[in-house]
Image (spheres, grey):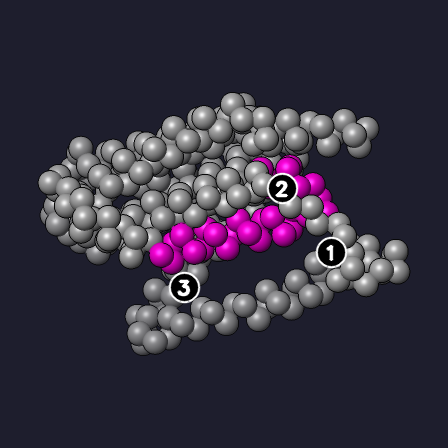
Amino acid sequence: GEKKSSMIGVRTSASYFGGMILTLVAGELAVIKWNYAYLVFLVIFPVIFIAAKWLPSNDMAVITGQQPEQRASRDFKFNPAILFFCFVSFAFSVLHSIWGSNYSLFISRTGLGDAALAGTVSSVTSLAGFIMGVIFGFIYSRTKKYVFVLGCTCTLLSFTLMVTTVSVPTLFLASFLSSAGSGIVFSSNMLAVANLLGPKNSTIGVAMINVTGDLGYFFSPAIIDAIYQVAKPTVAEGKFFIGVIGLAIMWVILLAGTFVKQLNFVQADKEKACAAA
């Protein structure tokens, strides 16, 4: 329950914090020489070492004497509800990627500032994701099954501000809301999968969520550009407008999902807790 949600929130915070630090380091290295920025990828080697040495191992196959392949095939039970959360991960990533691909163009097109402002906005974006991860456990304890709706609402408001207003204060607010929404949605997705699949299968479920999310970010430019070419929105910030429409549809789907018993990951968590007791 609450401990699990807090731990997932901390994981999200660490991800945003690491991204913020690596971006700063890459920027400093690029000042020396442009291709030095790629040296930040060397951080993977200490990560591999730390994981190999200190990551706890809970290998039940060793305890039971089963082969890992046999145990995995016997234990894993596919829950169709996971497809819904994979869809949420993919669709939200496609739409949320609009922010990262277009906010710098928005600043340039509207004349609000230069690269320095874009860099500051990027820092606010990372900070918002970090903060949301830290307080995710508290947010989840108050909103429960409506936590997805809350996250989607934040990003929807962010994109709406980008379409309707042009000012530096609203740009920073939109930046904060966009990242806050993504932090809540991605943390909620991992929590939902962990609750529905249980501890034995949660790693596979979380991997599915991460993969579909990454695929969403990867295919987002092609998908959004294709929609833009077909729809040809007349508003100035056409791609953000597409995001508003897409997030509004997603908001309705997520709200409807709160009434579907098979998707109620909060109830699944309660049932597992009662069974354990």
Query: Residue 264 at what x, y percent from top left?
Result: 58, 29
Quick check: 114 left or right of 133? left
Q: Secondary structure at mark 2?
A: loop
Query: Label 2 neighbourhood size at 10 Å, few (<14), some (14-19), many (20+)?
Result: few
Amino acid carrying mark 1 in the image:
Ala
Taking depth in this image into account, of 70 and 143 the one nearest to the observer is: 70
Q: From the image, which quarter does the C terminus lie in?
A: top right
Q: Quadrant of residue 233?
A: top left
Does label 1 or label 2 sit earlier along the sequence?
1
Taking depth in this image into account, of 42 and 270 the one nearest to the observer is: 270
Q: Is residue 6 visible to us here?
A: no
Does label 1 or label 3 sit earlier along the sequence?
3
Q: Which residues are magenta?
A: 191-219
Amino acid carrying mark 2 in the image:
Asn
Query: Residue 101 at what x, y percent from top left?
Result: 28, 53
Which dot marks residue 33? none
Q: Give the distance between the C-alpha atoms of the residues marked 1 and 3, in whole angstroms.
A: 40 Å
Q: Is residue 262 above or below residue 56?
A: above
Query: What is the magenta segment's predominant secondary structure?
Result: helix
Which dot marks residue 79? 2
Q: Secondary structure at mark 1?
A: helix
Q: Secondary structure at mark 3?
A: helix
- Give the labeled residue for mark 3: 25
Q: Give the distance between the C-alpha atoms of the residues marked 1 and 2, in whole angstroms.
A: 15 Å
Which dot marks residue 72? 1
Quick check: 266 left or right of 28? right
Q: Is residue 214 magenta?
A: yes
Query: Label 3 neighbourhood size at 10 Å, few (<14), some (14-19), many (20+)?
Result: some
